[in-house]
Amino acid sequence: MMLNKIHHIAIIVSDYKKSREFYVDKLGFEVIRENFLPARNDWKLDLKLGDCELEIFGIEGRPARPTNPEANGLRHLAFHVEEIEPVVEWLNDMGIETEPIRVDEFTNKKMTFFKDPDGLPLELHE
């Protein structure tokens, strides 16, 4: 196979500052680089978590996500955790609401969802 792994995932956010705070200050992503693109009047923030990168584009005036989570396109981002309960508690302590923990019917592992500032579904999965 010629492909090795996913290098990055890119999302467009409605409020750059709010999303930067969420992913960097709350979830702990590392900032690789941050650039303002004057020709497009938008921000591009490259983040790292483990060996995967997340690109955040702060572009004003983009349409909201039409449905949640069953719209075409990116369904959700999933994060692997060793033990889900302390991570859920950590998120809740920061004011980030999570769905009840349930068991994935295919993997038999615990999982739950929470949302970023734009309502993008984010998953925790053991």
Image (cartoon, helix red, strand yellow):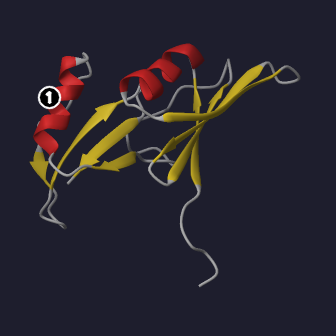
Q: Position of residue 94 (x, y in %)?
A: 25, 17
Quadrant of the drawing holding the N terminus: bottom right
How far across and down, in percent of the image, does residue 114 sit?
Answer: 28, 33
Res 118 visible: no
Q: Amino acid at mark 1?
A: Glu
Residue sitting at x 58%, y 51%:
8
Name the spot of residue 61 as percent of width and height, x first. Answer: 67, 18
Q: Position of residue 24 (x, y in %)?
A: 46, 26
Residue located 52% across and 22% down the image: 20
Q: Quadrant of residue 108?
A: bottom left
Name the residue tied to disc 1: 89
Q: Is residue 100 left or right of residue 78?
A: left
Q: Residue at x 37, y 41 (%)?
A: 69
Q: How many marks?
A: 1
Q: Quadrant of residue 95?
A: top left
- Residue in the image at 19% along x and 22% along y: 92
* In front of the other: 2 or 29: 29
Using a 10 Å C-alpha cutoff, classify the residue at mark 1 as few (fewer than 14 neighbours), some (14 to 19) or many (20 or more).
some
